[in-house]
Amino acid sequence: MDGHNHVPERLIVVSNRLPVTVKRAGGGFEYTPSVGGLATTLNALREDMEMIWIGTPGINVGSADEFQRIETDLRERFDSVPLQLSAEQFDKYYLGFSNGCIWPLFHYFPQFAHYDHEEWEAYRDVNARFCEKVLEHAGPNDTIWVHDYHLMLLPAMIREALPDAIIGYFLHIPFPSYEIFRTLPWREEILRGLIGSDLVGFHSYGYARHFLSSLLRILGLDQDFGRVNLGDRTIRVDTFPLGVDVERFAGARELPEVQDELENLREQVAGKKVILSVDRLDFTKGILERMEAFERFLATRPEWLGKVSLITLLVPSRTQVPEYQQLKKQVDETIGRINGEFGLPGWTPITYLYRFLPFEKLAPLYLLADVGLVTPLRDGMNLVAKEYIATRTDDTGVLILSETAGAAAEMGEAIIVNPHDEEMIVEALEQALNLSLEDQVERNRVMRARLKRYDTNRWAADFITQMEALRDIRRSNLPRRLRDDLRQSLLNAYREADRRLLLLDYDGTLVKFAPTPEGARPDAELIKILSELEQPENNQVVVISGRDAETLEGWLGQAGIDLVAEHGARFRKDGGGGWKEAEEITVGNWKEELRPVFDVFVDRTPGALLEEKGHALVWHYRRAEPGLGLQRAAELTETLEGYVANTSLHILQGHKVVEVKPSMVSKGRAAQPWLHEKPEYDFILAIGDDVTDEALFEALPEDGWSVKVGIPERSKARFFVSDSAEVRRLLKDLQDTD
Ligand code: GDG
């Protein structure tokens, strides 16, 4: 986030289902807006901005007349736009591809995923139908927010028609690891669909990382701090853990109907301990595994017989699908078996509710339960875990939570279990039932505070703010792609100039990044290009690098070009002679002071290393685990900021490096001797990929050709190219121009 707090003028939300349920009633229709969850959160945004919601109405109407009535009602009363699909098309897209292929696959159940070409085509067609609907309502500059796995192709479809729209996409389920995702026959189409967005959001950092890794391995797209360069635009990939409506759940115990129901329930359980689980009846939720763990608990901890009950609320879901019918049957049988085996007159081990309960009946269950048992095998987030904690404002109760639920990333104070490990669940149950009140409160207080800070409203506001920030970046003066026509102008300017100066960064510009600093030696072709470009009388090539003088000398000394090392601290001019110090830099013995700080971060980050240069300390994390590296880079920067405040030291976040150096050393300053040479150069080209090159771009005269390599966001350069291969081609073309 960068401090912007804009709201879009108009937001178009698109999801499979509209947040209104339509039912036939009498001769007409009855509309019930969904309460709670995403619907409530997003609908609350209507206070600040104009918003329309596009989705299917969840009802099948035969005649066009009837549909028109629904359409008018939804539009007028709910600012919602229904999309009508035939029952057959809907089934193939929704039950077929979305829930028969993507849902199991993304939850690590590849054995349940069926790959059916017809269903895939229906999915694509329905995404296209959604796109048409969006285009009926969206203007060229609108902000569009697409939700979930049913609509993964939609962002690219909208992008094609509305290149300037801001498009956000949020996935509510896990994004699986590359090894799972790669088995999908349509993996490439799905990724291309998603990158039509400007912002792709996930519940957790792990999912974002899996997505980025698939982009790299399948489409060859690399990332930089969660930004992916697509050539003509950049997309952002980020984490937005969905929260719950804390106020609503926390307020539940004040409601008279909740209090009555709670009292009623308490009488019924008559002092017995209560374990609660709440799920949609779905194979991802680990329902059978949980029952079996409870069975084992009863078998191995007989002292609890008659003293504890498991209340399991299962909400019917996808009931037409054979796998779900099968699961329902197994659940019924398992519960029957356990109750038959352990039940006593007056005590049933498992109380089984198979229906949807209104909020006023659900909240009392959360308040009643001593233990919340949430053990999905995989779950994008799992809101039940958060709701349980949010409802219990006195911070009592124990949450047992599966490590494979997205929520586990934020709820580390819960008892975390592996949902496949029966014994671990049994032990967790025992621990939970015996946990002291103080311990309960201590754990829950921390979690509840966190839930309050990042509730649903904050989540939505964060996502929207990020989308709008991207709009601001797009509006600002970004470098332009060095397209063929611009490239031709550059070559013409070069040809016509009397004196030409080429200021070139080294790593990431002339050569690709290598895993270690020593690995990026120049190849023979590069040396040849550089020395030939230096040949003509009127040409001057300067490599301005952050590397130390010895390395540059060893690698590029033979090319006869000028060299600047350590971002300008030392230089070698006129193709030979010795190295000179740019100026005396005395900032005390800052290196002695800061080295221990760096050392700590080397120790804490496997793969990271410290490089010491004449005038700088550089922490490299290219070889560290990517996520960890980024996280530590941010921490290190923050720590260093405390040390360097009010000194002339500078912290630079470069390509997988964090560097500290005195700020009078900069590439812009380093270029001055050449920029002020007489007679003047009338063609100046500067190319670089790093934040340190920005100072160089800024130092160029207005008609200078500054070219950024990689993502153009926040660069002062006039132009950009994608990678070092493109730089190489450009230099060769310059060579061929004379
Ligand atoms: C998907 C992802 C992700 C359930 N029974 C009743 C009832 N519920 C409510 C709960 C909760 C919601 O339904 C279930 O949400 P979950 O997050 O647990 O799971 P999914 O339905 O699978 O949702 C999931 C979520 O999207 C959001 O991004 O967290 O990982 O799979 O809010 O309270 N509500 C009422 N009566 C019930 O009987 N009133």
Image (tube, helix red, strand yellow):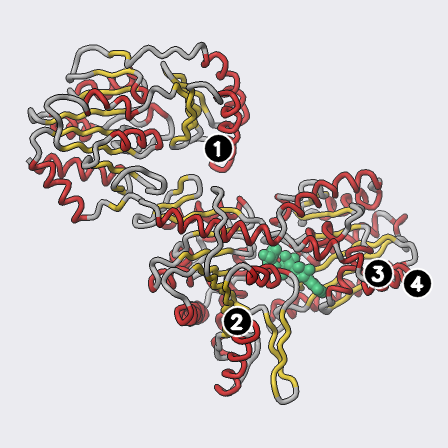
Q: Residue at x 83, y 48 (%)?
A: 300
Instruction: Please identify, in this view, whether the residue under mark 4 or under mark 2 is nearer the observer.
Output: 2
Dot 4 crowding, Cα within 10 Å, few <14, some 14–19, many 20+? few
| x and y, in percent, of residue 239 in the image | 52, 47
Circle on res. 259: 3
Q: Earlier in the sequence, mark 2 or mark 3?
A: 2
The residue that disc 4 covers is 346
The residue that disc 1 covers is 629
Q: Earlier in the sequence, mark 1 or mark 3?
A: 3
Q: Is residue 533 left or right of residue 414?
A: left
In front here: 634 or 398? Answer: 634
Instruction: Please identify, in this view, whether the residue under mark 1 or under mark 3 is nearer the observer.
Output: 3
Query: Marks 4 and 1: in contact by CB < 8 Å?
Result: no
Is 241 located above or below residue 75 in the figure? above
| x and y, in percent, of residue 339 in the image | 83, 62
**Disc 3 within 8 angstroms of ligand 1 (CB):** no
Quarter of the image containing the C terminus? top left
Q: Earlier in the sequence, mark 4 or mark 3?
A: 3
Circle on res. 260: none
Instruction: Please identify, in this view, whether the residue under mark 4 or under mark 3 is nearer the observer.
Output: 3
Q: Earlier in the sequence, mark 4 or mark 2?
A: 2
The residue that disc 2 covers is 80
Q: CA distance from mark 4 to mark 2?
A: 50 Å
